[in-house]
Amino acid sequence: MVKAQLRPEIQALRGIAVAIVVVTHLWPAALPGGFVGVDVFFAISGFLITGHLLRELERGGHISLAAFWARRARRILPAALFVLAICALATLAIVPETRWPQFLGEIRTSAVYVQNWQLAASAVDYFASAEGPSPVQHYWSLSAEEQFYLVWPVGLAAVAALFNGRKRRIAIGVLMGVLALGSLAFSIHETASDPAAAYFVTTTRAWEFAAGGLLALAGTARRRRAVSWLGIGGIAIAAALYSPTTAFPGIAAALPVAGALAVIWAGAPGRVLRFAPLLFLGDISYSVYLWHWPLRTLAPYATSGRVDTTTTLTVLMLTILLAWLTKLLIEDPVRSGRLLSRHRAGWTFGTAGAATAAVLALVASGNAHLRQEVHAAERASQQLLASAPPCFAAAARDPEHPCSNPRLRLKVVPTPIEAHKQRNSPCPKLELRGLLYVCGFGVAPAKATTTVALLGDSHAAHWRAAVNVVARQRKWAGVSISHTGCPFSKATKNLPEPRRTQCVQWNRQVLQWFKRHPEVTTVFVSQISGGVGVIAPGRNQLAAQKAGYLAAWKALPASVQQIVVLRDTPKVVGDTDTCVQEAIGRHRPAGPACSVPRRSALSTDSAAIAAASLRDGRERVVDLTPFFCDRRRCYPVIGGALVFKDQNHMTETWSASLGPYLLRALNLEDARGARD
């Protein structure tokens, strides 16, 4: 059984863990696998908390859950809530309103320690979130720890109530072992099938806490220096050789966890693990972890996007300074001060509840302000649209009728904060079968001259407003069939499971649907360009993608007489919406100020290339890129209309404005086909 004394090797291990986490976040290329420091922390927590609970059982035969949770609250919550409050205030002060929903939402879930499940539900890639990480995204690990602190002592207390003496220790060991093996098996499975979610959920990490608990139950050795060095080496290898592409946690997490347990078991600090700066870092490691990520993510907003080596070093120094001050002025006084520690647990819970409520109130005030801003922007947008200004949106780039309206120079409709809340054009549900969701647009089927379909991934859906304009002009009934991330193709897109298999199944269901609906005579297809398919080694990616599209179109029944391939739209960079919002606030023309190079905005569209290569008259390509871009630049605001609501999806306003020009392009194609 572990003794209740401060062990320098554990403090040093904490220092190592937080150091590699900070390095990988500030200099990712230097230590790509430094995220394993979190797993080291989990193993340490499992060991220390379980050891404490076991000692309490030995002394009194039971566990005081209220006292345990009160101690944990005094240890964890003061610094965590303080940093959350600072992050909320910083968000309201320096972060553009386009980021408020994400940032404030994650601050809210972090304050109640369920953020890891929120991130898992949205399947956020911790290393490459499309919109950029929030300043509290690292609180996912604290959420997992708090959930461990909540559940773990209840399990041990239940076992203690059922068993005594030696049977109790055996039962506790069985409980920990079953939990560890079950969680590890689930972690391996989930990492393979849904890696983005597996990274965050507590169930894939529980075995790491349980492994530390098993070591606390089994006991530790002393002065096994070679084992200690092996443990440090295992952690170092994982930190140096792992990367964001490593399937993690899964079985890969076993190396850093085993390394941490080896250091704890060996109990041989030596000179390196008694190095004073390392022990100091271990002593303030919790606050270092809390501060480094907010400082890193908020730095671009505080420096107008300029983050260089000097800025990064400043972030590092501020992290150490703020962590030390937080430890000195907040952590230690609250944890050991008389105000709470000398009173019943209820005092701690009440104080923690009040502090949490204060953070949530900051979040609520920010959201209320944002709602007011959105409502004001919506009213202004409606007024502008009702006035039907000339040269609005796509009309401003009509190559056949050049047009300019100086009154629209500073207008943006909708604003980015409006657009973030808007969906694609309305589409009432017609059918839901398996993975297939079918909705309708255009005119009513009873009044329609024919039925057309809009097919593909989310990039098909964002064309719906434009195709709807065409459908109403030509009296078509339209059906929209889309599945996010899934192109209509016989080639398999390289997606993590289960999405890859779902896409294959969706494509099969699409073909079955068309066989059941011979009334569909024309199909519009579109999908996000670029991406990687699953192909044999050495094969050409573009050729494989083209073959996949051609095979899918060929598989459509003969009742589909025409396939219109809509060339994919450009893409903008992740902070373009922020740039536009800032340009609005500074009364600058947002289109030119936030434009992106054409060469980076336009990806190779293999579907358009495939359709252009055919000469059978069934397939045609419509390319409206000139409405988005000139020869050098692509623009996020054109003719007073916001083009993109995120990195690559059109706003409904802009899409609808393309409708007349899509109709014109189809009329030209029809005329050309008639001549041929």
Image (tube, rainbow, N blue to C red):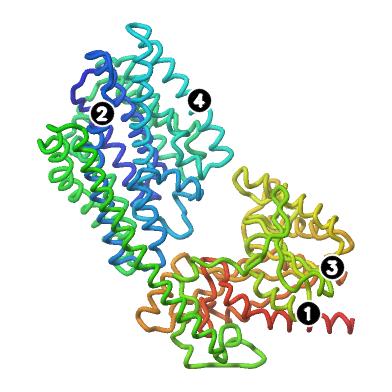
**Which one is in front in this view, the residue at disc 1 or the one at disc 4?**
1
**Which one is in front in this view, the residue at disc 3 or the one at disc 2?**
2
User: In the rendered structure, are the residues bearing label 4 and label 2 in contact, judged by CB atoms less than 8 Å apart?
Assistant: no
Residue lying farthest to the left in this orientation: 338
Among numbered discs 4 and 2, the one appearing first in the sequence: 2
Q: Picture coordinates of residue 123 (x, y %)?
A: 51, 48
Q: Picture coordinates of residue 208 (x, y %)?
A: 41, 29
Instruction: Kindly identify the amino acid type of the residue bearing the numbered disc 1.
Output: Arg
Instruction: Kindly identify the amino acid type of the residue bearing the numbered disc 3.
Output: Thr
The answer to whether residue 109 is left or right of residue 563 is left
Residue denoted by label 1: 474
Real-space Cα separation, disc 1 to disc 4, in angstroms: 59 Å
Mark 2 falls on what kind of element?
helix
Residue at screen point 72% across, 47% down: 505
Residue denoted by label 2: 68
Q: Picture coordinates of residue 439 (x, y %)?
A: 70, 62
Real-space Cα separation, disc 4 to disc 3, in angstroms: 53 Å
- Dot 2, how many residues are within 10 Å of its Cα: few (below 14), some (14-19), or many (20+)? some
Q: Quadrant of the N terminus?
A: top left
Q: Classify 470 as above or below 396.
A: above
Real-space Cα separation, disc 1 to disc 2, in angstroms: 71 Å
Instruction: Kindly identify the amino acid type of the residue bearing the numbered disc 4.
Output: Gly
Real-space Cα separation, disc 1 to disc 3, in angstroms: 14 Å
Q: Quadrant of the C terminus?
A: bottom right
Among numbered discs 1 and 3, the one appearing first in the sequence: 1
